[in-house]
Image (spheres, rainbow, N blue to C red):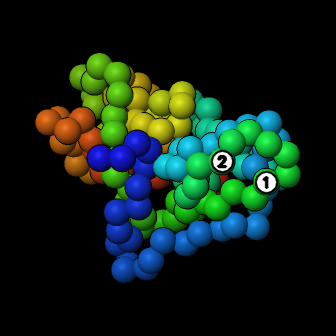
Amino acid sequence: MAQGFQFAFNDYGAPERRISDIMATNATAFTEGQAVTLTSGRWAAVANGGAIAGFANQTIAAGTDQYLEVILAREGDWFDAPYTGTPAGGFVVGVDVADIATNGLSVLASDVTGGALSVREINTNKQTCRVKVKKRLFG
């Protein structure tokens, strides 16, 4: 599986929704699949425990006044992502407070308190999971 979060499907059959008219935070690099939020009107990396607006749909180097295309995290959207860290005892199907890793590219399996993600599937062989964003910026 590729690094980062990837849109899997929407419960209602809707295609992914992209936004490309908002700029990235200056002097910040972004990686495709990275969780993002809005800070001061620009895309920024999501902090541990923060609300997720969506996921970067492109990789850009740090620069000035660059637009970043983002796949929104909406009601009904499911995403596939790798998980990192030693899974906590509570990292099971159905947990609804899994957190994002500090790089924003994976689920932090060792942190299941106060996170934005609910877990639907866990593949221990591939160290991946399917998640829904419950704590959304545009929720």
Residue 8 position (above or below residue 129): below
Rendered location of residue 13, percent (x, y): 37, 80
Left or right, 45 with respect to 27, comes to: left
Q: Are marks 2 and 1 in contact (CB under 8 Å)?
A: yes
Task: Name the residue furthest left.
Answer: 125
Residue at (41, 25) in percent of width and height: 111
Residue at the disc numbered 2:
60
Q: Is residue 57 left or right of residue 121?
A: right
The amino acid sitting under disc 1 is: Gln
Q: Is residue 136 left or right of residue 38?
A: left
Quick one: label 1, few (<14), some, or many (20+) residues within 10 Å? some
User: In the image, residue 25 lies at what x, y percent?
Assistant: 79, 44
Q: Secondary structure at mark 1?
A: loop
N-term-proximal mark, 2 vs 1: 2
Instruction: Point out the image quarter for the C terminus.
Output: bottom right
User: Mark 1 sits on what residue?
Assistant: 66
Residue 74, percent from left and from top: 52, 65
Q: Nearer the viewer, residue 5 or 108?
A: 5
Residue at image location 53% in from the left, 50% down from the top: 32
